[in-house]
Image (cartoon, rainbow, N blue to C red):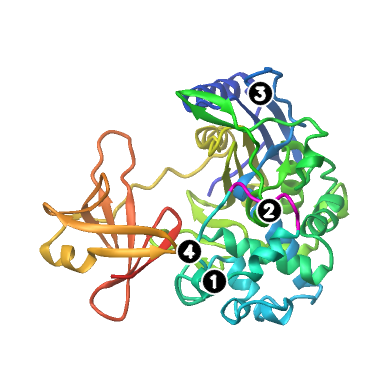
Amino acid sequence: MAALAQMPRLDNAAIERVVTEELRATNTPGAAVAIVAAGRVLFARGYGVANVESPAPVTPDMLFRLGSTTKMFTAAAVATLALEKKIDLQAPVGRYIQGLDPAIARLTAHQLLSHTSGLKDEAPMFGSHDESALGDGIRRWTPAFLFTEPGKIYSYSNPGYWLAGYLAETVAGKPYADVVEERLFKPLGMARSTYRPTMAMTRPLAQGHEVVAGKPAVIRPAADNAASWPAGSMFSNVQDLARFVLAFLDGGKLDGKQALPAELVATLSTRRADIPGSTGGYGYGLNVSRERGVSWVQHGGSRAGYGSSIVMVPDQNFGVIIVANRTGSSMPKTSAAIVEMFLDLEAKKKDASELRALTASDLTRYAGTYANGAQRISLVAEGGALVRGSTRFTQAGKDYLSTETTGDAPALRLALVPGAGSKIEYVHFGGRSYRRVD
């Protein structure tokens, strides 16, 4: 069992080396890092610059847009309404929201929050700035937004969280952004966090960047789409996020008071769905797993211009928070290195599953086209392998395909989910499930 036996001495120089190396290796202009341990914020610091054009240094109070780390806040807002008996998580959302297509109205909050709704995935970064766009867009959904039957399989869906956020908005009778502020930001003292760009721009703000011609460049115009705010558009900083983590790790208590309902932590972190091809699962707005002797509760985020990560180890009252200002940069090496500095974890287990070469029967059974909305995965039999674009899956394990690899690079895996017949019904890759359509 891992243990945080005593508060370790902070090695600021070691943390700085890890952060600056990952910033350099990933072309990320800047990041902020906070560490929560033993009931307090042990560390909060910024690195790099907030804007490559006017290089002010990143500070811990500086706002970044989170990407999908936002989902734990949407889930928490819905869950607080459920704990107050204002929402039944197992009831069709059509009970609360009028004017939905019948196929959409039958979905439940449980399915939306656990990514088992059968909704396809998409993440348009640019759109309307008007907050009414959230409900307007959802009311235009047709059954085509479903790629499979609800409740059948886990598949990460941003639209599922749009609908969950709109459910909270409808039941609370106020805009989604106000619901989260009232139920989470204010009780936790997250004074600078917001969804609204016109509020964020009045505070210290890191500009979003993307890599252009090998160098980070400011994204212009800044990406915004009010119709997708509940899935990935919250602005926050590591100081505010640390307050959420402190409360989460102490049963909702913060500064000696019950800031959030005590039952909320279990509601969010209870495993609700298994992820195909993984030992981990999903709660509500959180990935949950048990590895190396401890339980992990975490979520990362990626959106235009930004990336983020919150990793919590409740067993040890420990958490790491990272925000960064380059598309998709969640700084995983930094997060992993900090965890290793503080926790005495069990050794990583080697993959004990046996791999074998694909057979002619495998090629026939697994080849085909699989879809999640407009996204497709086509597996074509070619020379003893199953080929998807430039990726060659040459080996099979128990219910998954694997690429070959050399050195320390991990193999790519594609999970196989059989149906009632002899062929595979779904493949699962990159968090999304795809249903056979050929």
The circle drawn on residue 155 is 4
Which sits earlier in the primary sequence, circle 4 or circle 3?
3
Q: Residue at x 57, y 66 (%)?
A: 114
Q: Is residue 357 visible?
A: no
Q: Residue at x 47, y 77 (%)?
A: 149
Q: Which residues are magenta?
A: 125-131
Distance from Cα at disc 4 to Cα at disc 3: 35 Å
Q: Image check: 263 left or right of 327?
A: right
The amino acid type of the residue labelled 1 equals: Ser
Residue highlighted by disc 1: 117
Residue highlighted by disc 2: 229
Percent position of residue 160, x then y: 59, 64
Dot 2 falls on a residue whose secondary structure is helix
* Residue 25 is a magenta residue: no
Distance from Cα at disc 1 to Cα at disc 3: 39 Å
The amino acid type of the residue labelled 2 equals: Trp
Residue highlighted by disc 3: 51
Q: Image check: 253 left or right of 31?
A: right
> Does 145 appear above or below 37?
below
